[in-house]
Structure formats: structure tokens, C-alpha cells
Amino acid sequence: MKRDDLVLYLDGYLDVHALKDYADNGLQVEGADEVTKLAFAVDACQETIDGAIAAGAQMLVVHHGLFWGKPLLIVGPHRRRVYALLDAGCSLYAAHLPLDRHPEVGNNAQLARLLGLTVTGELGEAFGAAVGVIAEAGEGLARKQLVARLAAVLGRPPLVTFGGPEQVRRIGIISGGAAGDILAAAAAGCDTYVTGEASHAHYHAAAEYGLNVLYGGHYATETVGVQALAAHLANKFGLPWTFIDRPTGL
């Protein structure tokens, strides 16, 4: 498949230019004209770049790219990353907030689906656009069951603080580093909140606002979107792909 056709499709499907972001979304490094295999990872780092090249991919698609809206000198480790991509003819494509908020393959929509919940609304805001989701547990769900489900989905037990009811119904979900949206979840009537990173600054607020909070890890909660996007592209274009898993434990 032509690289430019794939980029055009990704730009449109993910709507990468529709909102402001901390990141430079879209094609960040231009590689070979033809793409016959894709690699996916959460982070663009030397390990994932090397893994994509070793797998024979002509494009690496990531959630966290190399460029974040500021001029960055091509020296040191950054130079080595960019050089490796260019030398191998491997493109780098990044989708940050567009992948968080996408209604089909987005991190938060996918987490809700994998947890057996029904998305009923939006949650949180970045640059004027909602990023997360509100999901319902139907007739209710024991919070220990939700914890077990999240552990099974992510392959690791979440850090949990219990400040809400034992039967949960309305769950806010924002992947990654969104502990600061605990108050937004409470204001939206959620009894439980699922996010990635924990925050000492927001620990007491969760209990005081009556929320259960499940911290699944920044990295782990953002593996689901890139893999859902990979499956979507494989189904649409028949492109083989590999996921380069480099967990940080955070």
C-alpha cells in the first residue's frame, strides 16, 4: 500500500487535525513509499523503533510520538531515533489525543468495551474537546468484579482506592495520566473512575467525593487503542502487523 494513501486514511479516520493537542499528530517521520507491514507501539523510543525495523515494518504507529509541539534539536538520543527510522525507511505516525478520544478504536472506548460496559457519555476536556467516556454497568456491578475485569484486560492488577459504593453503575474512564479528572468524574455523577497514573495530590479528593478509583497504569491503559487501530487497518487493508510491547510498569 502507498504510504501517502495510508497516511491520508489515518488522518481522516482519526481526525487528527480537528483539535489542538500537546503533540504533533500525524506523519512525524517519512519513510518508504510502499508499506507492506505495520508495527504498533504505545511509545516511540529506541526500543520500539528497533523492534519495528527488526520486524520488517515500513511504518511504526504510536500513541506517544517523538515531536510535541516544540522545536527539538536532532542530537543525542533523539538523533539516533530519527536516524534509525530514516536509515531503515520506516515511517513514524503518531496519534495522541485523537486516539484517546476516538469512538471506535480509542483507548477509552476500548477500555469500556473490554470491561463489558456501555458508553453513554463523554468525560474530561483537553483543548475544548472531551477525551474520556462515561460508561454504565447496567444493573450494577460489584466493584471487586470491575477490579478483576480490569486486571484481566490489562494483564496486571490495578492500584485501587475505595471511596465509593461496593455496587458500581456509572464509571468514568480516561486512560493515561488523568488523575486530575477525578473531580470531573465526580461532577458527572460517576461512582467509580478508571485511569492510568496515580496522583498523591488527588488521593484524598477521591475518598471525599465518594469515588472508587482504579489506576491501571499509564502504559497499560494505552495499549488497547493502538492494538484496536492495528486490527482495524488489518481488516480494512489486509496489512500484517506486530505490536511492540515495551511496558514501563508505570
Image (tube, rainbow, N blue to C red):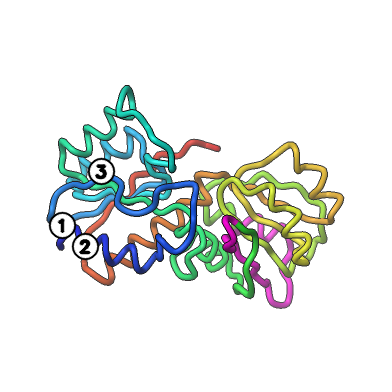
Mark 2–mark 3 CB contact (< 8 Å): no
Of labels 1 and 2, earlier in sequence is 1
For residue 67, side relative to residue 238 (left or right) = right
Where does label 3 land, which residue?
A: 52
Where does label 1 land, which residue?
A: 36
Amino acid carrying mark 1 in the image: Thr
Q: CA distance from mark 1 to mark 2?
A: 6 Å
Amino acid carrying mark 3 in the image: Ala
Residue with the most extreme right position: 208
The quadrant the C terminus occupies is top right
Residue with the most extreme front position: 71
Q: Provide residue 210's location: percent of width, then percent of height.
A: 84, 56
Mark 3 secondary-structure assignment: helix
Sort mark 1 into few (<14), some (14-19) or many (20+) by Cα contacts within 10 Å.
Answer: some
Q: CA distance from mark 2 to mark 3?
A: 14 Å
Q: Which mark is residue 239?
A: 2
Could you tell me which residue is drawn at 33 percent across and 34 percent down?
47
Q: Nearer the viewer, residue 183 or 240?
A: 183
Of labels 2 and 3, earlier in sequence is 3
Amino acid carrying mark 2 in the image: Leu
Of labels 3 and 1, earlier in sequence is 1
Mark 2 secondary-structure assignment: loop
**Quadrant of the image occupied by residue 201:** top right
Sort mark 3 into few (<14), some (14-19) or many (20+) by Cα contacts within 10 Å.
Answer: many
Mark 1–mark 2 CB contact (< 8 Å): yes
The boundaries of the magenta stretch are: 126-149
Could you tell me which residue is drawn at 15 percent across and 63 percent down?
1
